[in-house]
Amino acid sequence: MRARLLLGIGIVIAASWGCGDDDAATEILVVTSEQGAPLELEELVLRVEALDGDDAELVRETRTRARYVAGTLSPWSVTVGPRRPSDVGRVLYRFTAQGIRDGGVYVARQHRLAFVSGLRLTLQMRLSQLCAGVECGPDQTCGEAVCVGDFIPPCTLAPAGQRCDDPIVIVQDAGDMATPDARDMDVPDLGLGDLGMDQPDVRVEPPDADMMVVPADAGDMMIVEPPDLGTDRVDMGTDPPPDMGPDVADMMAPPPDTGPTGCVSDMDCNDGDPCTMDRCTSPTCTNTLMVCDDANPCTTDRCSSVTGLCTTSNVADDTMCGGGRHCCAGACVGVDTASRCGSCATACGSNQGCTAGACTCTAGFGDCTAASGCESNFSSDEAHCGNCTTTCTAGMSCVSGTCRDCTMSSECNDGLACTTDTCSGGGTCSNVVSSGCLIAGACIASGATNPANQCQVCTPSTSTTAWSNKANGTACNDALFCTMTDTCQAGACTGTGSPCPPPSSTCVPFCDEAEDACDANVTGPWCWIDGRCVHEMWEDEHPTNQCLGCEPMRDRFAWTWRSNDAGTLGEGCNDTMYCTATDRCVRGATIYDATCVGSGAMCDDGLACTTDSCNEGANRCNTPTVMTGNCAIDGVCYLSGTENPDNECQWCLSTMNQTAWSNRPQGANCGAADDYLECCGGVCRACTDASCGCAPCTGAEVCVDPLFAMRCGCSEF
């Protein structure tokens, strides 16, 4: 079997149309590249078109920045589906994957097939270097540098073990079936795992090319069926079409058209690329690439596929940037100075200046050796006296460019401040280094660092004529992002360690020197955000927003809204307010924005007759206020005048007490009419001479029967 190359060189586009409908057809599109894959692609484009005869309606176009990790293309996921349910099994779709380079289509591949009801199909499209620049005819695509038919019978892509009946497909002619380009197709597992990178190759063989095309009764519609593996053939004459069975017959009835399907919110349009602005204008998604431009002609500006921020990198030195200037280290500058003479990297040596883009010796000096610069002082150099070819004989000195004996020390002046110049008694000049170092004809101060090597220094005690290595362990900077501790070792700056965190089982960080950032290969419940591994179950990981977290199904490389799996309800949070009862994370304009919002009243006694309020400053509930004409007693509301259900001698009298029962007037009747009872102090008791009208009768008075007086009272008869 062919070795899988998803990890080494891959672009993966996984697509599923998931609306929670078991009958919804689904296409899973996977685009990968083979060995010899086109590198340095700038952008990937996926186009989905519904075909109607010669017309094509664009259903979706999605773009993303081509993301490379260690020289290989990284996975990319996209969700697609039909325009409407009635398209399923009846309308051909064309899927086109394009690799963009230098602003144009560098390599492309396309396939046509139909959606199948109730099945997830996996289609793999390979972008290969062999197809770069190859142009094919209509209804063809490039396959390994050869143009082949682009139609694929959907059932060749069905999951193993699942029944699949090739749908009714509107085709242009039988030639569409000639070369189904589906051989050797890797079908990855697109679960939460590693996109199938470590799974064995699955070979899906296409059906026999001699497929049966049976005329139908619906105009130009043709029913595409698998070939008959027996000896019979379909009569293409006037015989009626064979019995297709109930399954095919059912398929001929179009499903109900429930209208267009597509995105509902921006979250539905997330393409997993931090460098796109994902927006939903229902039902169409737009994924707009971020534009990065710092207006500097000497930098290349792009969006980082790791951070989603604009980054710049310098163009090649000596790229022309206008006005005869060159790009040097990201700046547009002239190249007519001793430090940049004719090019960015050309620095004139000692005793040299820059003239017309070339290093030239200053007056009195010559470039007579292989050393950099004009190290020979013609006025005093005995090896090059007056010019590069004259050498003074032994015992002679070079005095003012002439070989002769000196007569005074002033004649031995070599023009260097770091030497002591003397004329000996024998007429010989002596130029001894008296301070610092003399290296390549230039005076160097003691302790000065070599401008070409930060780990070398002028150390006169070690050498006055050459650079000395700094001590091992001296701090330096190797200018590499991916090293942490940089020290001088044997005269060279060496970095060790990594700024990236250690790996876990499903979050494996690595350092990306080109991006100046830590990146990671993440699968399962992990995200890589802000330079670290974050688990979806970890809460309060965002430094400032508790409503943003790791949601791998949305975006593994950015903080997103914390909600349930369906994306319909935000997770619980704490808005730090005492007076709100229920706090939840509410999504903002995009899935990358969310706020903790409290709702419901913390102070609610559940009584309709009270007004409740909360004191946020004191973190407490205020005492409820009972509404006029009501009593709130033992957690129950009563209208004024309502009798206590447990004591008929008490009632709700809101003008007297709104939170407790009030006693009815003294002597009010209670009990049955013939019980001879009255209310006294809130208690129902019998009328007697000793207690009549809640007071004793005096003298010859007796308590009158309330049946006649309607109220207990004392009377002399």
Image (spheres, rainbow, N blue to C red):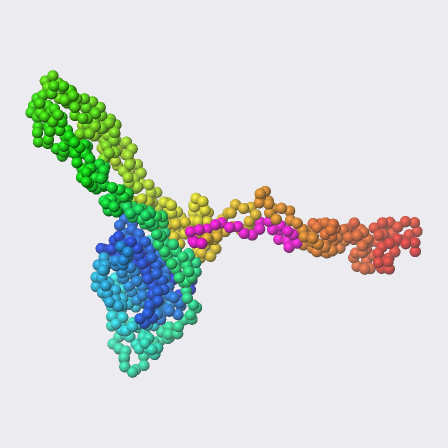
Who is closer to the viewer here, 287 or 117? 287
The one of 203 and 447 positioned closer to us in this rendering: 447
Q: Position of residue 680 (x, y in %)?
A: 80, 51
Quadrant (top left/top right/bottom left/bottom right) for the C terminus? bottom right
Residue 409 visible within the image: yes
- Name the residue: 37% across, 57% down: 287
Above or below, 448 against 556 in this view is above
Please, which residue is most extreme toward the bottom here?
A: 238
**Residue at image location 23% in from the left, 65% down from the top:** 136
> In the rendered image of this protein, does residue 364 appear above or below residue 282?
above
| Image location of residue 341, percent across then percent down | 21, 39
- As for residue 170 lying within the magenta part, the answer is no
Q: Is residue 611 magenta?
A: yes
- Closest to the observer, 109 or 698: 109
Question: How many numbered callouts?
Answer: 0
Query: Which picture quadrant has residue 4?
Result: bottom left
> Does residue 33 appear to the left or right of 162 in the view shown?
left
- Which segment did they paint magenta? 589-612
Q: Residue at x 33, y 55 (%)?
A: 64
* Res. 520 visible in picture: no
Q: Is residue 487 above or below residue 500?
A: above
Q: Which sits in the foreground, 688 or 659?
A: 659
